[in-house]
Amino acid sequence: MRSQGTGMKVNHSGEDYNIISLGYNQDPRGQQLQYQDQSSMYRNQLRGQNLYSRDHSVSHNVVTGQQRTPPVGTPQRPMPPPQLREMVPWGQ
């Protein structure tokens, strides 16, 4: 194999994203990594909302009486790539 030179024809990266541009690869593994990252950010936003609602039990400022508004709206759940849609339990 080495004498024919077939072993080193393609130089593939071991990462599922481009380490220079920091973009995801356009293959199933890159799409899966992007979905995992988006799901992590989604859960992070939900945790933030949960902490905010538990920290501020009343809907107004107790000292000034002004109405409080949550800092962020409800986040949207990320859509999985097509090859993962069968494995993700929707509607739960």
Image (spheres, rainbow, N blue to C red):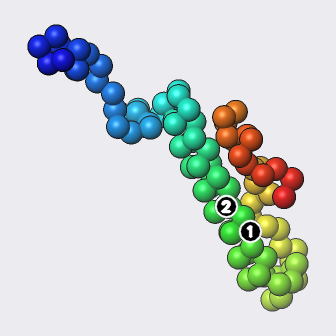
Task: Name the residue located 73 percent from the left edge and 48 percent from the top edge.
Answer: 88
Given residues 26 and 62, the one toward you in this image is 26
Label 1 vs label 2: CA separation? 10 Å
The residue that label 1 is drawn on is 49
Q: Which residue is situated farthest in the bottom direction here?
A: 63
Q: Amino acid at mark 2?
A: Arg
Give the image location of residue 74, x and y in percent: 80, 57
Task: Name the residue located 64 percent from the left edge and 63 percent from the top edge.
Answer: 44
Tell me if 70 is positioned left or right of 7 in this view.
Answer: right
Task: Name the residue located 82 percent from the left edge and 50 percent from the top edge.
Answer: 90
The reply to whether the C-beta atoms of the residues labelled 1 and 2 are less than 8 Å apart is: no
Give the image location of residue 43, x and y in percent: 67, 61
Given residues 70 and 51, the one toward you in this image is 51
Task: Name the residue located 61 percent from the left edge and 44 percent from the top edge.
Answer: 35
Residue 79 versus residue 20 in the image, above or below? below
Q: Quadrant of the C terminus?
A: bottom right
Q: Amino acid at mark 1?
A: Gln
In what element is the residue under mark 2?
helix
The label on residue 43 is 2
Q: Quadrant of residue 72?
A: bottom right
